[in-house]
Image (cartoon, helix red, strand yellow):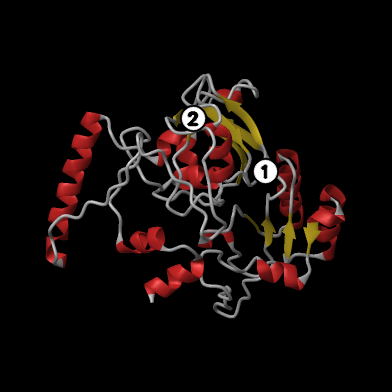
Amino acid sequence: MAFSQIALKALQDVLGAENVADDEIVCQSYSRVNWLPSGFLQRERLGTNMRPACVVMPGSTEEVQAIIKIANRYRFPFIPRGSGYTFQAFPAGAGYVVIDPKRMDRIIQLDGKNMCAVVEPYVCFAELQTEAMKVGLTCPTPLAGAQVSVLANYSWHGAYGNSWISGVGAHNLLAYEIVLPDGEIMRSGAPSLDKEEWFWNDGPGPDLRGLLRGGQFGHAGGLGMVTKISCRLLPWAGPTVFPTHGVSVEKRAPLPQDKFRWYMVRFPFDYPEEEEKELVQSAELFYEMGKAEIAVVATHLAQQFLYTYSSESKKDLFDNID
């Protein structure tokens, strides 16, 4: 069944009319992939417009639950959205409702003793880092940048610069709360038994983190909408507040040289057929750094990420790629 005016009214009754939008201009803005060049919109594919029929903005897990139950009642498809930096955050056909959790932006808990945080979907890495560093902690930040959602990144697959300290993304996701496609709420780990305890992922309670991932990249919202996660934090040896100077895009925030250095290592292989040798030597270097317990981040970069790191703006990035 297509999205209807009756369904629209039901959503407005639950969320308030100000948090439900079916205006074409607003909906068109939700057909754009944020990391692609300006003006690039999802085009019509196989005769189907990628513009959602409606955008809803819940403010709590209970409101997400109500939206999904209304979707089941009136039989319209929905898709959860984080900060909009992946193709999976967009409609796959006509009549979709996009759930935008921009009102769910709280750091619910920052636990310095147990070194973890509980966050809602719209908390970005920059926000969590800012608060965590005040108490001597940090969290790994993905190569996509500090503006993306902590919850979406860790729930999806957690791609970021790795090291012996941080491990891989699966290690940083602890417990979570998800609204399933039938509207039921499920919690993994400790909060399945006690809503106030989020620091433990393996028990008491079931460890269901594999449900989010499935394969390499997980279900990307296909099995419901994650509304809270707890994530692991790590010790931070740097300043509690970054000294900054300048104005964006020229703003600079230098790390203290007595604690941090940045190196780019290039192995002497110049031909594509020698790439495997380079990867082997990179892995051997990482093993040795891990044994020595040095390097906050150690990663082998593809050329596209070298462009990303050396660009000061989105325009600069696409100019460099061209």
Front position among marks 1 and 2: 2
Q: Which residue is mark 1?
A: 105
The amino acid on which the numbered mark 1 sits, given as a three-letter code, is Asp
Query: Where 125 falls versus 118 (above or below)?
Result: below
Query: Where 76 falls versus 243 (above or below)?
Result: below
Q: Secondary structure at mark 1?
A: loop
The quarter of the picture where residue 294 lies is top left
Answer few, some or many: residues within 10 Å of disc 2's Cα (few below 14, many 20 plus, some between 14 and 19).
many
Q: Position of residue 159 (x, y in %)?
A: 41, 48
Q: Position of residue 115 (x, y in %)?
A: 50, 25
Q: Secondary structure at mark 2?
A: strand
The amino acid on which the numbered mark 2 sits, given as a three-letter code, is Leu
* Quarter of the image where the C terminus is located: bottom left
The quarter of the picture where residue 125 lies is top right
Q: Can residue 175 be seen from the camera position used here?
A: no
Q: Which residue is mark 2?
A: 137
Q: Residue at x 53, y 24 (%)?
A: 199
Q: Position of residue 29 (x, y in %)?
A: 67, 68
Q: Residue at x 52, y 62 (%)?
A: 87
Query: Where 182 falls versus 320 (above or below)?
Result: above
Q: Nearer the viewer, residue 282 or 24?
A: 282
How many numbered marks, from 0 up?
A: 2
